[in-house]
Amino acid sequence: MPLPRRIVLVGPMGAGKSTIGRQLARELGYHFLDSDRVIEERCGADIPWIFDVEGEAGFRQRESAILKELSETGASVLATGGGAVMKEDNHQWLKQDAVVVYLKASLEQQFERTRKDRNRPLLQNDDPEAVLRKLFELRDPIYSRLADIVMLTDRKSPRLVVRQIINRLNPRTPRQRRKVRKEDRNHA
């Protein structure tokens, strides 16, 4: 089975999309793209500033335009922002010529990985755990519906997750192919 032209990583904050995406792209010889970094580069401002000035709606509008543009790239791994799936219009850009991988992390893991990060505007409040819980309840069904592959990231090194993704994309032996089919049935 040939590798897909594009691999799109979706999932919540703290799931490891940027870290895993960068390593996956390097391993495959693909170009790595991070939609949040592209937005910051184009705006000349960081995401918290964009949220402060334009609000979440302004940011999401910019995000949609970037996702549309990046859907035209060649061999690439795209790490998306956690909320990229919230606009129905974005789904076509995420799925276009791509395999969508949902990097799924528990609420505990998300909180542990994001608790000191000041670059996440949605978590800058008195109860970031409650925000993560609410976002997970809202977004998890959407991530799951869009995903071609669901990959759990809790207590796994980025290197292991990258290996597992590559094996799911292109199982090499009959035994590996049977294992992937069995995993797919268990996740269905």
Image: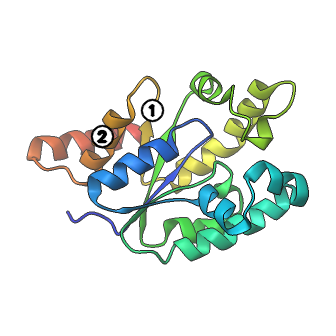
Question: At 30% from the left edge and 40% from the top edge, which residue is drawn?
Answer: 164
The image position of residue 74, as x and y in percent, is 39, 74
Place of residue 95 in the rendered image (x, y in percent of width and height, measured from the top left): 50, 66
Residue ID at (33%, 36%): 159
Q: Residue furthest front?
A: 44
Q: Quadrant of residue 38?
A: bottom right
Task: Inspect the image, locate mark 2, and give the three-letter code of the amino acid beneath it.
Answer: Gln
**Among numbered discs 2 and 1, the one appearing first in the sequence:** 1
Please tell me how many numbered marks the rendered image carries: 2
Q: State the separation of the CA atoms marked 2 and 1.
A: 10 Å
* Nearer-the-camera pick, 48 or 172: 48
Near mark 1 (Cα within 10 A), the count class, few <14, some 14-19 or many ≥20, is many
Where is mark 1, residue-wise?
A: 153
User: Residue at 60% across / 68% down in the picture?
Assistant: 67
Residue 123 is drawn in which quadrant? top right
Report the front residue among 174 and 69. 69
Q: Give how far across and how far down residue 133 sits, in percent.
A: 72, 30
Amino acid on which disc 1 is placed: Thr
Label 2 sits on a secondary structure element that is helix
Q: Is residue 120 left or right of residue 19?
A: right
Depicted 87 relative to depicted 17: above or below: below
Marking on residue 75: none
Residue bearing the label numbered 2: 164
Residue 90: x and y in percent read: 64, 67
The quadrant of the picture occupied by the N terminus is: bottom left
